[in-house]
Amino acid sequence: MTVTSTPDVRTPPRPRDGLLLVDKESGITSHDAVDLVRRRTKIRKIGHTGTLDPLATGLLVLCIGRTTRLQAYLMKMDKTYEGTIQFGWATDTYDSQGQPAGEPVEKSVEHLDIESLLDEFRGEIEQMPPPFSAKKVGGVRAYELARKGETPKLEAKRVSIPELTLLAVRGSQVDFRLRCTAGTYVRSVAHALGVTTGLGAHLRALRRTRIGSFDVSNAIPTRVIREGVDDVFDEKHFVRMHEIDLPLERVMIDRSQEAKLLRGQSVIVKPQTDGMKAADLVSITSVDNELLAIAEVAEVLREGGPLVLQPRLVLKE
């Protein structure tokens, strides 16, 4: 008698829509972390809300499934870092992975008033990106030009650093905490401090601890994902789409308005916060607190009165 075995066909998990909080280890790229999650979950539609350099560790917020459509809005969230600046020599990449620009000799900064020097970087500043960065120059990434020995013609960008806290001064090293707007280069802060002191400096270590309201303490380490032991979609580090707190004003609508919105039609609502104006973006939720859409204020019918909201991105299917 011939016995035929049934092939072991495993159905891939159903794609889930939400945000996965990942704690990236040093030595891998953000793209490596995304690929790791793709292999583990068998989900292809995954994106991130801001990269980390290979040297850096800490929080990556990954968008999964339909949530990838929110990437542009989530990338605008403030980011918080803790790191260490090494004084004594600069590098071409502005961090410890680059080539030293001079003799690598540690130089103590304990005699300097580092606290007052940090004032230069607090608030809104004009910042020059590092030559080894992903900024495009004539359609080419700056780091691609820098690797060829060319000097990228970069332009300063206005960024904001609402918080820059000195944590410790240890000989030739300075520990700090920094909260900044998207697009800020912490490496550039380290390099600029080296220029200001005349001692040369580079970023020795960096860890991202927060993105918006998301904290690295709730993230799943890439090492754990690789080992395949814990559930990637555990509620501690997976935020379902309807639970996402976008960095936008939130407006709740009723059932009849929801039906119109899902057909792409505009809705008229009472303002739920003061100061809303035309062209402002809002997140729209249902009476069940489900995230439905991103909408634009098309018109303010009268000062302090009803708003006309036009859907820009409908999330509910």
Image (tube, grey):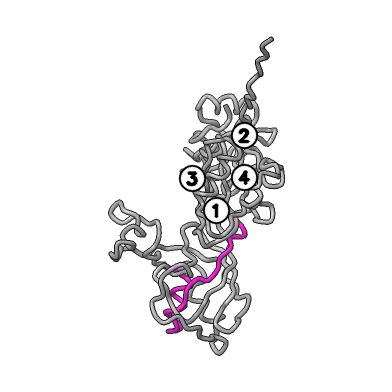
Q: Measure how far apart labels 2 and 4 are at the Cα level.
A: 10 Å
**Secondary-structure class at tag 4:** strand
The residue pinned by badge 1 equals 77
The residue pinned by badge 4 equals 20
Whether residues under marks 2 and 1 lie with C-beta atoms below 8 angstroms apart, the answer is no
Q: What label sits on residue 16 in the rendered view?
A: 2
Crowding near the residue tagged with mark 4, few <14, some 14–19, many ≥20 C-alpha atoms within 10 Å: many
- Which is nearer the eye, 306 or 104? 104
* Residue under the image location 56 percent in, 80 percent down: 115
Asked if residue 217 is positioned above or below residue 260 in the image, the reply reads below
The residue pinned by badge 3 equals 72
Task: Please report whichever mark, 4 or 3, sits nearer to the chain's N-terminal start.
Answer: 4
Q: Is residue 132 magenta?
A: no
Residue lying furthest bottom in this view?
Answer: 111
- Which is nearer the eye, 78 or 99? 99
Residue 95 percent across, percent down from the top left: 47, 69
**Secondary-structure class at tag 1:** loop
Stretch of the chain drawn in magenta: 188-210
Task: Please report whichever mark, 2 or 3, sits nearer to the chain's N-terminal start.
Answer: 2
| Front of the two marks 2 and 3 | 2
Q: Measure how far apart labels 3 and 1 are at the Cα level.
A: 10 Å
- Which quarter of the rendered picture does the C terminus lie within? top right
**Hey, which quadrant is residue 134 in on the image?**
bottom left
* Residue under the image location 48 percent in, 35 percent down: 312
Crowding near the residue tagged with mark 2, few <14, some 14–19, many ≥20 C-alpha atoms within 10 Å: some
Whether residues under marks 4 and 1 lie with C-beta atoms below 8 angstroms apart, the answer is no
**Secondary-structure class at tag 3:** helix
Task: Please report whichever mark, 4 or 1, sits nearer to the chain's N-terminal start.
Answer: 4
> What's the amino acid at mark 3?
Ala
